[in-house]
Every structure is written in structure tokens, then in C-alpha cells.
Amino acid sequence: MKTANVIEISALKYSWASTDTPVLDISELSVPKGQRLFLKGPSGSGKSTLLNVLGAVIVPDEGQIRVLDQDLENMSQSRRDRFRADHIGFIFQQFNLIPYLSVIQNVCLGVRFSHRRSLQASASGLTIAMEAQRLLSALGLNDESLLRRRVTDLSVGQQQRVAAARALLGRPELVIADEPTSSLDMDNRKAFVELLENECTQSNATLVFVSHDPTLSDAFDRVLDLALINKVKNQ
């Protein structure tokens, strides 16, 4: 029988191979379907590392990590890449945009690697490009001339919103956001969080959101301090 939890962690441990220094030691963590989780903690508490585990970017040394009823620790690299492309929208802290592509090309790039998300992006009758434009407009990037510009011509805050639109395109079941508002002013932070919540509500997606900004936490269903569940002491 399928679980009601999108994320289930049990006895998870992870250390960086280069230093053999423990980063994560989490006995248990579960996140129900549709929950909006605000994850906080001091620098060095393992927040970004945990997001990379949840996003199938890295695998734990020990323990079990189940996401959307799939055991990630038993997947090959290629299967994890496919799983992430099909089911997870990841807003990376460093954006990971392609510098020689335009804004609209960067947003549409993610669904090019997932037939499933391509179909979902156009399910409402819009083309993929039109859906990408809708998301960009909701994030305050509604200047048509901007859509054709290279992302390197944009400000850091604008690039951050492009990365968010790319992650949301195609309605992934799990959205992972690593410090997604760090380069935005207060008004744009609130608009950004509102868009994330609206998009996740429409698709019943689960949201895991990391931020150092405590003023945003009230908008979430649950606030979790990683330092309280990670047995590894803050480095």
C-alpha cells in the first residue's frame, strides 16, 4: 500500500568522501503529501546537503530515503537523474542556469529532459513556452524583450526568479528550494513565496523550502529546525 508521505527518512547518515566528516545523522523524518515545510538552521547544519539527498543528487552512506514511494538509495545514477527530471523541481542555491541560453530557453530546458513534465506543462492548453511565460510573469518578469535576452544580462535577483520558473514548469510533485529568496527584496520575496504556494496548491505538490529569513516562516504549514534532528553538531 502506498504511503501518504512524500518523504520518509530512516537512520540516514552522510559524510563528505573527501574529508570523511559527518554532515548528516538523522534518525527519522517524514513529510506528508502537500505539506509546505520551512527548513531552517545555522550555517553548517547540513540543510543544503539534506536537500541534495532529497533531490536524488547524492546518496546517503547509510539508512533509507524514500521519495514518492521510491527508494533512492538503491537507484543507479541514471535512474536518479530520470526520477529527478520527472518528479522534482529543484531551485539550486547557485541557480545552475545555462549562460549562453536566453531566459525563456533556460525556463523551458528542464522539461526537455522529461516527457512527463512536458505533457503536464501543456495540459492546460498552453504551449510550453506560454506556460513558461505565465510563470515568469507571475514572478514579475513580464517584459517580453527580457525573455529573449541571455540570462547573464540579468541581475542576480532576476536570475533567481528564472531558476524558480524553471523548477515549477511541468508541475513536479516535489519542489525543493535552497535559499530561493536570498537575492530578492522584501516585496519580491513575498511575491515569490506566494507564487510557490499557489503553484504547489494547484498541483498538490509538496514544498521543502530552506531559508535564513524567519519572516517567511509564517506562510508555511510546518517549521523545522534541522539542528534539532541532525545528531551531527554544527561545524
Image: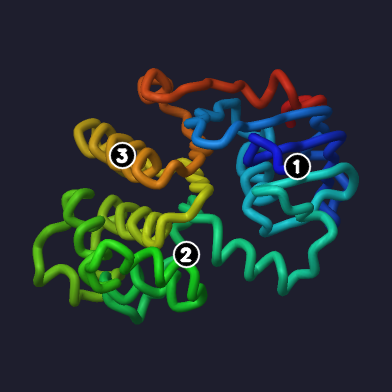
Picture layout, residue 146 above or below residue 161? below
Q: Residues within 10 Å of mark 3 (few under 14, many from 20)?
A: few
- Residue with the mark numbered 3: 198
Helix, strand or loop at mark 1: loop
Q: Residue at 17% across / 50% down in the picture?
A: 140
Viewer-closest of 128 and 160: 128
Query: Which tag, 1 or 3, sits closer to the chain's start?
Result: 1
Is 53 situated left or right of 36 in this image?
right
- Residue with the mark numbered 1: 1
Viewer-closest of 224 and 121: 121
Q: Residues within 10 Å of mark 1 (few under 14, many from 20)?
A: few
The answer to whether residue 104 shows anywhere in this view is yes
- The quadrant of the picture occupied by the C terminus is top right
Picture layout, residue 114 above or below residue 202? below
Q: Nearer the viewer, mark 1 or mark 3?
A: 1
User: Looking at this rendering, what residue extends furthest in the bottom direction?
Assistant: 100
